Amino acid sequence: MSNLPAQMTDMLKGLQAAKARMKTASAGTGTDYLRLTKQANWEYGADSVEVEDGAMWAINPKSFEMGYIAWGDSSNVLGESMAPAYDEPIVRSTLPDVGANWDDQYSIQMACVSGEDKGQQVMFKSTARGARDEIQRVLEALLLKVEGGESDIVAIVKLESSSYKHKKFGKIVTPVLNIVRWEGMGATEVLEDEPEAEVAEAPKRRRRKVS
């Protein structure tokens, strides 16, 4: 039997759990990261592939995570600890000292179910208040579906944006996950209810940022 007081034992378990989560987080998921630029463009991957306008994405209802991330001066990650939203929350005070503040972070995973990006899987995570509020809004909508006993619990969204004017920083772009419908867990493809008439013009080429 441990000679540590019960409170210290609990703290030790918390630190060990935090360490394990950080190792998992630093290992990565192999999924491309999705981001919204200051120019209100949605992009993903190392090549900054622009998301197709009007494409629909399915949010994995099991992928909602909450936790913390610590950034260094050069925007390098000094530490990251995330846990599923339905699991025990991570306690900030149990996280190790990495020489920087631990910021709140939310994340979700989604897959494209229409258009050129169909099948592409991405992770969207952010510390920005607007992004966290939007993810929380979708989570609350999902909760209502589950509480109502509904089987269609996969939110199908279109990636949009909004903005507001900040007194100090000027125009701030915020993400909008526009829920257009709900599907079952097996949804891999979604078609528009009323497809637009075909237009005789050359298809647009995918645009990638030039480094």
Image: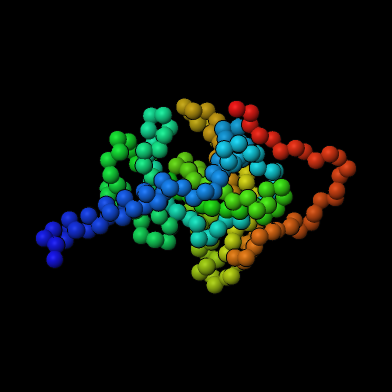
Rendered location of residue 21, percent (x, y): 36, 52
Q: Give the side of residue 198 with respect to residue 118, left or right.
A: right
The one nearer the camera, 83 or 21, is 21
Tell whether 160 sits left or right of 107.
Answer: right
Q: Residue at x 11, y 60 (%)?
A: 3
Image point 22% across, 55% down: which residue?
12
Which residue appears farthest toward the left when viewing the image? 3
Residue 150 screen position, x and y as percent: 58, 70
Image quadrant in which you'd find residue 35: top right
Instruction: Please tell me which residue lies in front, 21 or 165.
Output: 21
The quarter in which the C terminus is drawn is top right
Can residue 135 be seen here? no
Q: Residue furthest right?
A: 200
| Numbered circles on residues, count | 0
Q: Which residue does the image show at 69% across and 59% down from the upper left?
A: 189
Work out whether 62 lies above or below 123.
below
Q: Position of residue 124 (x, y in %)?
A: 53, 47
